[in-house]
Image (cartoon, rainbow, N blue to C red):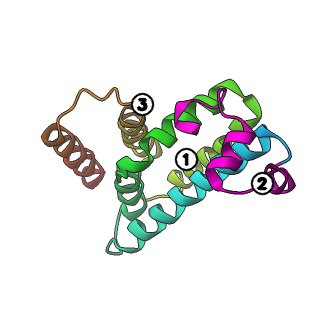
Amino acid sequence: MIESGASRMTLDAVASKAHISKGGLLHHFPTKLALLDAMVRRQIERRQKARKRIFEGLPVGPKRYVKGYVLSALNRDKGYDGLGAALFAAVVHEPKLTEPVRDIVKKTYGELESTDMKFEKAAIVALAADALRLEEILSVSPFTEEQRKRIIDELLRLIDEG
């Protein structure tokens, strides 16, 4: 539904697909914007939970946060790529939807300042991971799986270099 574009999504179609009445849907989401906002926030929450699981699985030590960031940013769930692309497009077209995204990006990059790695280097590594993830969400990444793995390995090596 959203995968075909937020501008084409209707509350009638969402209610039908969810097998609920439109009135039931409107009770929770009075507008399409409210529904899209909830979807963006849920996607952020899902990514944050995945990031936490990955971070907790890393051994305690130097550069743990930056390594966790890279590994979680590049943790693929191809089933959500279409949704991610559609929500990205919705955010671009509806400025109000950027608020929760902006908040989490600001918080995350702020946490890079308190790591044991020079902020500028940590930010460059994080930006590289974010760019690769965005290319994958938008299905424009030119890299093979082997190249992707080598890129991730190099990002992790740069982190260890500190």
Q: Is residue 5 part of the magenta span, yes or no?
A: yes
What residue is shown at x 35% (from left), y 54% (from top)? 75
Total marks placed: 3
Q: Amino acid at mark 1?
A: Tyr
Which residue matches tag 2?
21
Which residue matches tag 3?
138
Q: Amino acid at mark 2?
A: Ser
Crowdedness near tag 3: few (<14), some (14–19) or many (≥20) residues, C-alpha within 10 Å: some
Tag 3–tag 1 contact (CB < 8 Å): no
Residue 117 locus on image (x, y percent): 40, 53
Left or right: where 76 falls relative to 34: left
Residue 93 locus on image (x, y percent): 67, 24
Compared with 111, 152 (above or below) is above
Distance between the alpha carbons at the discs numbered 3 and 2:
32 Å
| Magenta extent | 1-29
* Element at label 3: loop
